[in-house]
Amino acid sequence: MSDARHCASGCPTSAPGSARGPIAHAWRALRHRNFKLFFFGQSTSLIGTWMTRLATAWLVYQLTHSALLLGVVSFCGQIVSFLLGPFAAVWVERLERRRLLVCTQTAAAVQSLTLAALTLAHVVTLGEIIALMMFQGLINAFDMPGRQSFLVQMVEDRGDLANAIAINSSMVNGARLIGPAIGGLIIAAFGAGWCYLIDGVSYLAVIVSLLLMRLATMKGRGRPGTSLIEELREGWQYVSGSRPIRTILLLLALTCVMGWSYSVLLPVFAGEVLHGGAYTLGWLTAASGLGAFSSALTLAMRKSILGLTRALQAAVVVLGVGLILFGFSHVLWASLALLAAIGFGLIQTAAACNTIIQSLVADDMRARVMGYYTMAFVGSTPLGSLAAGALAQRIGAPHTVMLTGTFCILAAVWFTSQLPKIKPEMRASYREKEQSAMRAAREATA
């Protein structure tokens, strides 16, 4: 991507404020009022979300003591996003983004509060957990492409878009660091139900932040007289017809299927490999979050996307090697260090893929393409979770993560073989976007 300097629109080589030093540069997207509101509201809510994820994993493990059922619950919670992702993204194109996000966040709050009521009343069953996880998957199918495409509205200067993506990743993974640590303490002291209750209340922060935003009127982009199937077909043709986008989405899907599956087995590692409890699980999840957070910060401090494909290659290798070594570890401090490396590799991969795709995609296709991103990032994970749960039941959790790590390294080798084919097309796309931006600027001046 040596010619990425040609992409003045959507993938800048510099940004306002970079002269103020790397720290100011790393947070420059927060100068936009709407994005700043979203950052603080979503950060609060995400801490509750990660507490809920930890609580659900521990609650299922307490109820079943089965690695396979951990995989089944994760599968059921995410397969809905996988199946509905592209269809939901077409609907997202037709809807006003802020209104959509208020609805999805409200629905997510209802889901968490329902779990809280059932768990605190000591009547929750595995079937109810699975049903509510599937409901959350339905919400995520609309929420994720809506949130990703809404970034363009919150960040008026396209030169800050890549930085906003990196900060958004920092926000998610900062919460991933804090939420499980708090969640482990709350579960140990009061039980999982309180995690769900706190999560349900925390959604108020992001809902209020959305309502306080001042946004230019932007209606959905759906075309009158065009069917959902037709727009879905156009989105698929756009993704499949772009070699760089389809290659990066395929790498992301392969990495998520194999790389994310370790997380569903963490209760097994905490209880059986490291001989700990809920607090140990909290530390393991937080260690992964620490690595992910540091990864997001390194991306936020980048002044351009130059070299991002090389960073993507390295991230997948780090992920694979970390998983293999984690399978060998039976010592808590070593496992924590390796999980930090795994978290770094995972988020570096996901955020780099997001940034590259957002820099390449046309605006009228953004939500539809981000629907496929959701399908690759979140939706493909249940397949890996189910496979990991079944494998762990037969060969053990340590051998399972070693196997998934090997597949990640093979995915990195495949991506490296594809780079000579996709780089020329990426450069051509960046030049086209630059020319389009220059024409738009001339028309605005005239």
Image (tube, helix red, strand yellow):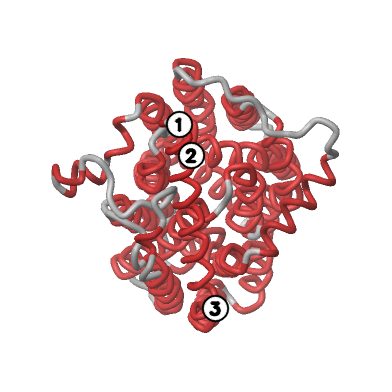
Quarter occupied by the C terminus: top left
Residue that carries the numbered disc 2 in the rendered image? 440
- Disc 1 residue type (three-letter): Ala
Mark sitting earlier along the chain (2/3): 3
**Residue positioned 61% across, 57% down in the render:** 65
Query: How far is disc 1 from disc 2 in space, using C-alphas?
Result: 6 Å
**Residue positioned 69% across, 57% down in the render:** 238
- Disc 2 residue type (three-letter): Ala
- Among all residues in the image, which is located at the extreme left? 20
Q: Closer to the camera, 412 or 276?
A: 412
Query: How far is disc 1 from disc 3 in space, using C-alphas?
Result: 36 Å
Query: How far is disc 2 from disc 3 in space, using C-alphas?
Result: 30 Å
Under tag 3, what secondary structure? helix
User: Tags 2 and 3 in contact by the CB under 8 Å rule?
Assistant: no
Residue that carries the numbered disc 1 in the rendered image? 444
Q: Closer to the camera, 206 or 341?
A: 206
Q: What label does residue 263 carry, if any?
A: none
**Disc nearest the viewer among 1 and 3:** 1
Q: Position of residue 200 (x, y in %)?
A: 54, 26
Q: Position of residue 438 (x, y in %)?
A: 43, 45
